[in-house]
Amino acid sequence: MSNPIDIKKEVASPKRPTLMASPVASRAAMFESIPLVSPMATPSVLQNPKTPPVVSQEERNNLPIHGELPHVRCIARARIPTVQGPEIFLHLYENNLDKKEHLAIVFGEDIRSQSLFKRRDGDTQQDRMTRGAYVGKLFPGRVCADKDDQLGLELHFDANGDLIRKPETTFAGDVLTRIHSECYTGETAWSARCDCGEQFNEAGRLMGDSGHGCIVYLRQEGRGIGLGEKLKAYNLQDLGADTVQANLMLRHPADGRSFSLATAILVDLGLLSIKLLTNNPDKILAVEGKNRDVKVVERIPMVPLAWLSTEEGIKSKEIEGYLSTKIERMGHLLEKPLKI
Ligand SMILES: [Zn+2]
């Protein structure tokens, strides 16, 4: 897929100690500079954000995407404690483009969906708590969704029943965001053909640390071609094709994904200013859209863990080919580390 805008490739060079034969004294000094434990994945990304590319409105207007956002509605939200520690609030969406159940994985109780919290005809406080439109924390015997007396929090609504976003109860600020497309093989079947599972985990870890974040999880498996076609593409790759060639041989676009649903979901959540975790320049523009409903104020690169540490990350011959294709054929903003 050609990148419509000429964005200079940036170098996300991993910090790796160089282990070469050296005299004993200098070798001792060298070892002092090596961390004793393997570094956390993408350790410095939050301190090392990238300025997003500057794009003119004319260039934006030429993007092959529609100006109108699709309609989305959050139909349920629930708190999920996680095995890593931080709680997430899982939001399930319906929309007017497809019949799929797209999701928002939200870090922070105070990130609120406008469509979920809107007062509906005949809505009771019990209805609102059941669909997750409550403030604070649920507990046995609670009767009011809009007010949590224990935490001293109360929501307010305008005459149309729309939530009034007050800073005491509703988050507003630049938020860590990732737009993630479902990958059954990488996230569930332990595949080492791609880095989707690793990127998903990393995004979650960074958002858990930051306290706020949102992963928009779109049900578009295999860059939009579906799982069955993706499995065929894997066989073509084993026969020698790369990721892009395999999709084209199956008469699919190299990347058939659409991100307008992600933009609509972010707008619904009130996340209009985001720090996007991505290496993909096309994704920045696709999420911002023609009208810049959502603004990417920072780009935070996702460096493969295997490039940062010899102990962590995916090790397979397939992943090397996959990452090379992303960089060389799809314009991703990473450069391969030099082999030492
Ligand atoms: Zn994947």
Image (spheres, rainbow, N blue to C red):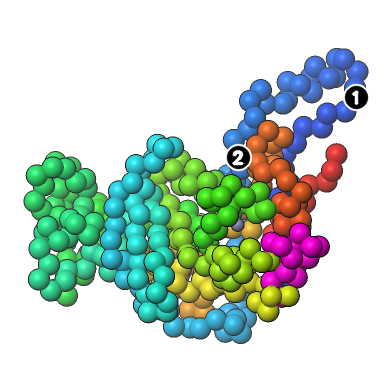
Q: Quadrant of the N terminus?
A: bottom right
Q: Position of residue 5 (x, y in %)?
A: 68, 74
Q: Which residues are magenta?
A: 234-248
> As shown in the figure, which amino acid type bears the numbered disc 2?
Ala
Q: Is residue 333 left or right of residue 210?
A: right
Rendering coords of residue 232 (x, y %) = 66, 66
- Say if residue 87 shows up in the picture: yes
- Identified at 61% across, 69% down, the residue is 229
The residue where tag 1 is placed is 21
Image point (63%, 25%), residue name:
37
Check disc 2 and report the residue beneath it: 41
Mark earlier in primary sequence (1, 2): 1
- What residue occupies the far top of the structure in this picture? 25
Q: In which quadrant is the C terminus drawn?
A: top right
- Counting from the top left corner in percent of width and height, residue 146 is at 15, 56
Which residue is rendered at x = 37% and y = 79% of the image?
Answer: 96
Q: For residue 85, what is the image quadrant?
A: top left
- 252 falls in the magenta region: no
Q: Considering depth in this image, is 289 or 235 the residue closer to the camera?
A: 235
Q: CA distance from mark 1 to mark 2?
A: 27 Å
